[in-house]
Image (spheres, grey):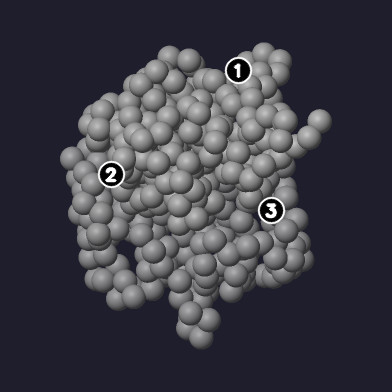
Amino acid sequence: MHATERPQFFRFHNGDKVPLPFSRAEYEARLMGLRTIMDAHGVAAAVLTSMHNVAYYSGFLYCSFGRPYALVVTASDAVVISAGIDAGQPWRRSAWDGITYTDWERDNFWRAVAHVSGTGKTVGVEEDHLTMAQMGKLRVFLRPGTTVDIAQATMRQRMVKSEAERDLIRAGAAVADIGGYAIRDAIAEGVREIDVAIAGRDAMEKEIARRFPDAEYRDTWVWFQSGLNTDGAHNPVTARQLRQGDILSLNTFPMISGYYTALERTLFLGEPDAASRRIWEANVAAHELGISLIRPGVSCAEITHRINDFFAGRDLLQYRSFGYGHSFGVLSHYYGREAGLELREDIDTVLEPGMVISMEPMMTIPANMPGAGGYREHDILIVTPEGAENITGFPFGASHNIL
């Protein structure tokens, strides 16, 4: 058979649909929300290309490996467009239809997208995800009358979690705690950061498999940092050996069906010096203040300014590293940040019931100063009609985390 006789795309519905993280009704409600967004913007076809939106609206979390993927939604259809290398898995792991594109001919992905979306329509896209090259191909193959950026609107939809999402996030927070205790048990003088991290990750993956026997297992990770390596919240794990007197940063990140949760704690291996203890206690006090401020009706900026005032009153604000918290949901360290719900000065979003947000103040003291290192605590809170539910259980502060 000549290459020109091979299909550009086809349906490969291999096997049976498998249990998804949420019910069919949950995905139908999400799709209804998306179609409401489309109607409000005059969009006839939405071409969602980000990992987070494809997963949120369909249940399928793709592995790109340099290939494009999409969920194409019209008034009547919802179809995952996936690469042939994945065979039937995208369809099995999706609530909707699936079309597989082949690599016999360049840009078969866009031919499959156009097959569902049609041409000459108003097309909704995620401008914060499409590269300039892919946007150019969209215009060639879909010939849209116009394109509309719906990324912000879909983010706002994702920011308020359903009851089922909140239940999954609670489970994730409990798994993060289990990883934290495994890390705590593995800490000892002379042990490498990487060995401590492995202990926490393994404990979490086993617990996720126990709680969610029908899930896929991937992406759960740990950042365990010591000494100077604590100065950044996202510093990679190293082979550094732990020493007496070290400041330690425990960070567990269980991933359940694309949903991220986290636990982050400051610890010390041995009694901290006076300067370190003073800074740690100040950060813990800011953490407790921040937790008390999270409730419906208050804005992200308002919470941020209150904590800023606390640090400024102790001449510590200049050591703050980043914002004081962020949203949770379909996200990871490489996809899905819900930037509209972050505790920063420039975010005016008002908290409402169903939102899930962290409180995580961090200070970094430079290496040439007393108390040098990075200090960070992190709890996850679900905003309720009355206030907030703290779903993190691992204790924080000097009375618990000096080893």
In x, y percent, where is residue 343?
31, 54
In the image, which disc is placed on residue 294?
2
Q: CA distance from mark 1 to mark 3?
A: 31 Å
Residue picked out by circle 3: 197
Instruction: Using the rendered view, name the quadrant where residue 285 is placed.
Output: bottom left
Vertical placement of residue 257 versus 187, above or below: above
Instruction: Determine which of the numbered discs, if any, sits on residue 134 in the image.
Output: none
Q: Is residue 204 visible?
A: no
* Marks 2/3: CA–CA distance: 31 Å
- Measuring from the top left, give residue 346's x and y in whole percent: 25, 59
Q: Secondary structure at mark 1?
A: loop
Residue 115: in sight, yes or no? yes
Gap in angstroms between the C-alphas marked 2 and 1:
35 Å
Classify residue 257 as left or right of residue 390: right
Mark 1 and mark 3 lie on one chain; the one further toward the N terminus is 1
Q: Amino acid at mark 1?
A: Pro
Count of labels shown? 3
Q: Are marks 2 and 3 in contact (CB under 8 Å)?
A: no
* Figure quadrant of the N terminus: top right
Query: First in sequence: mark 2 or mark 1?
Result: 1
Q: Residue at x 72, y 30 (%)?
A: 5
Amino acid type at mark 3: Ala
Q: Position of residue 155 (x, y in %)?
A: 35, 41
Apparent side of residue 74 relative to residue 90 in the rendered image (left or right): left
The image quadrant that residue 161 belongs to is top left
Select label 2 or label 1 by which is in front. 1
- Between 76 and 291, the residue placed more toward the observer is 76
Residue drawn 70% across and 61% down? 193
Query: Closer to the N terminus: mark 2 or mark 3?
Result: 3
Residue contact between numbered discs 1 and 3, judged by CB atoms under 8 Å: no
